[in-house]
Image (cartoon, rainbow, N blue to C red):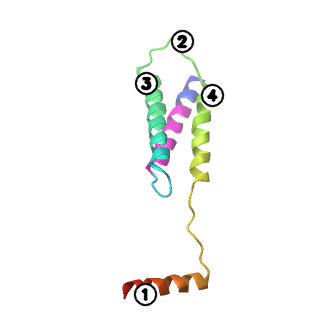
Amino acid sequence: MFNWYVGLLALSGVLMLAMAAVKNGHSVTSRSINAIFGAVFLGYAGYLAFLFDGGSYLIFFQAFIVPIMMVVNFFRNRTPAPKLTDTQKAWREYQQSEQQR
């Protein structure tokens, strides 16, 4: 059980740090929160894996709600590339050509 908990903490931390690294369409606040929580999760997993000598420890499975919410927020706030019709493409090309004059 201990190894699973440490592994899940590390996986959650790496996942949140990876989401923080993606700039496309995400606010600075969202990316900062992902980075902070990712570093905390990864740091705690590292502490438990390498520095913890044994004894008693608490397992907070509620902590895994945060990464789940961050992943949901990450995919909900994506800004997909607009799919333009032929008319819209032609209009944009016309506008760009007029701006260059």
What's the CA distance linking mark 1 and mark 2? 70 Å
**Residue 14 lies in the magenta-colored region:** yes
- Camera-nearest residue between 89 and 46: 89
Q: Quadrant of the C terminus?
A: bottom left
Quarter of the rendering occupied by the N terminus: top right
The main secondary structure of the magenta stretch is: helix
User: Dot 1: within a 10 Å radius of its alpha carbon, few (fewer than 14), some, or many (20 or more) residues?
Assistant: few
Q: Residue at x 43, y 87 (%)?
A: 98
Q: Which residue is mark 2?
A: 56
Q: Which residue is mark 3?
A: 47
Q: Magenta span covers which residues?
A: 7-21
- The three-letter amino acid code for the residue at tag 4 is Gln
Task: Name the residue furthest top.
Answer: 55
- The image quarter containing residue 100 is bottom left
Report the amino acid beneath label 2: Ser
Q: Is residue 14 in view?
A: no
Indicate the secondary structure of the residue bearing disc 2: loop
**Residue on which the image places disc 4:** 62
The alpha-carbon separation of the residues under discs 2 and 4 comes to 18 Å
The span from disc 3 to disc 2 (Cα, nearest Å) is 14 Å
Q: Which residue is mark 1?
A: 97
